[in-house]
Amino acid sequence: MFRRGRRAPQQPLPDGWTDDMNIGLPADRTEAQVVDFVLARAEAGTAGDALVVAVRDEFQVTGGDAELAVDRTYGGLVRAFTRNPANRPDRSIDPLAWISFGRATSDPSIIARLLPQLSARNNEEQHGPPDRTG
């Protein structure tokens, strides 16, 4: 049975796994700058490997950290799409998703612009399929 407001007990992570989604940044760069960079580049049409390379080069991080940065930025958007405050990422272990969640919560049009497939599906679920008779 599901109860609102109660969290499932945390299970220990398998050996070698971590739930820490922080990336190593140069001292003069911030997580907010990374999120804003990913969002701006994505809105400009940069995607996939090109977006990862852009993050890597701009912030002088490893390829793995650049991939994680893009993944967690989008992870925050997907969580914000749910409009459920309980889906807010934990700031200490997933700061990029936490920042991205905040950006998308403040400006839901970010989700519509970067994840139009989610917005279209949600609209159809709430209002029915588009009228294509005309």
Image (cartoon, grey):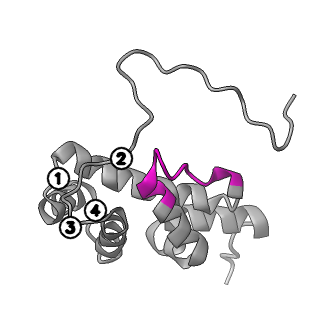
User: Element at badge 4?
Assistant: loop
Q: Label 3 belongs to which residue?
A: 28
Q: Which kind of residue does numbered mark 2 sit on?
A: Asn
Q: Mark 3 or mark 2: which is in front?
A: 3
Q: Mark 4 or mark 3: which is in front?
A: 3
Q: Residue 44: x percent and y percent? A: 29, 77
* Contact? badges 4 and 2 (CB < 8 Å): no
Q: Could you give the CA–CA distance between mark 3 and mark 2, rounded to whole angstroms?
A: 16 Å
Residue interval drawn in magenta: 86-98
Q: Mark 1 or mark 4: which is in front?
A: 1
Q: Could you give the CA–CA distance between mark 4 and mark 2, rounded to whole angstroms?
A: 22 Å
User: Element at badge 2?
Assistant: loop
Q: Which kind of residue does numbered mark 3 sit on?
A: Asp
Quadrant of the image occupied by residue 133:
bottom right
Q: Label 1 belongs to which residue?
A: 61
Q: Label 4 belongs to which residue?
A: 47
Q: Residue at x 44, y 54 (%)?
A: 95
Q: Is residue 4 left or right of residue 58?
A: right
Q: Which kind of residue does numbered mark 4 sit on?
A: Ala
Q: Is residue 104 left or right of residue 121?
A: left
Q: Residue at x 55, y 49 (%)?
A: 90
Q: Which mark is residue 22?
A: 2
* Contact? badges 2 and 1 (CB < 8 Å): no
